[in-house]
Image: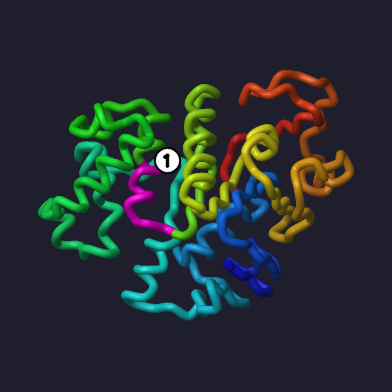
Amino acid sequence: MLKLSAVTKRFGSSIAVNGIDLDIDKGQIIGVIGRSGAGKSTLLRIINRLIDPSEGTIEFDGKRVSELRGRDLRLWRARCAMIFQQFNLVNRLDVLTNVLVGRVASSGTLPILFKQFSAEERTMAAKALDRLNLLPHALQRADTLSGGQQQRVAIARALVQMPDIVLADEPIASLDPHNARLVMEALKTINREDGITVICNLHTLDAARTYCTRIIGLAKGSVVFDGAPEALTNDILQRIYGEDGGAPVDERLTSGQFGRPQTHPVWTEPLATA
């Protein structure tokens, strides 16, 4: 279990994350929603320890993650893989090597720099690409792929880290609907087949409802909703999105971009990251 207790992050006089308490069981797939600036990206970076909390603790299976340093911290970041909106691939390297970069925590930096990968690691990377229908592109430069393909390469890179948790920070914000669907289906598949916990910041309510079994709503750095997608009411959506004159709820029942008729109002939110 991942446990956050009273986690707070301050940047000067601003509070980005405000006293968050969460218990996240293994194998859940969670969508984190909220307006731009609500603290979604900061929350994921705190969990991964890319940034440190100002207050509070993070524990995983009883171990105090918030106190890890050095090699132990690097190993935690491998177990808690991060996927970013802008892919974070090395454009001049081929796809297979970009995936193998995910082994840096286990293999060290020098083998990665000199491309000294074991046969076992190469096989692991090839299998990850094959799962994501990208094996034919293994020897292409990363920058020759489409945005959706690059994001799936980033998912393959996360898989070779052999993670317990995958954190995805707005993974579909810059993608067209078709590629967004492929990326979300890939995350859903690894959650279902591998039992990997997935925590995903999402800018569309439609995606969260379609792919996630639990939704966490943030507003001004605080959790204002934590529950099943079907429990989201208009009043709750107003608390999540509607403060300070947020966008209105679209009451029309339309077909969602993920191919499922909408049974709830659709919330329109800017595509900016938290």
The location of residue 8, given as percent across then percent down, is: 64, 70
- Closer to the camera in the image, 55 or 25: 25
Q: In which quarter of the image is residue 91?
A: top left
Residue displayed at 49% across by 57% down: 165
- Residue where numbered disc 1 is placed: 86
Residue displayed at 83% across by 21% down: 252
The location of residue 25, given as percent across then percent down, is: 62, 62
User: Height in image: 133 above or below 117?
Assistant: above
The location of residue 27, given as percent across then percent down, is: 57, 55
Q: In which quarter of the image is the N terminus?
A: bottom right
The magenta span reads 154-163
User: Height in image: 1 above or below 42?
Assistant: below
- Closer to the camera in the image, 87 or 75: 75
| Residue 84 visible in the picture | yes
Label 1 environment density (alpha carbons within 10 Å; few <14, some 14–19, many ≥20): some
Left or right of 127: which side holds 192?
A: right
Q: Which residue lies furthest to the right in this view?
A: 235
User: Height in image: 259 above or below 138?
Assistant: above
Residue displayed at 42% across by 58% down: 163
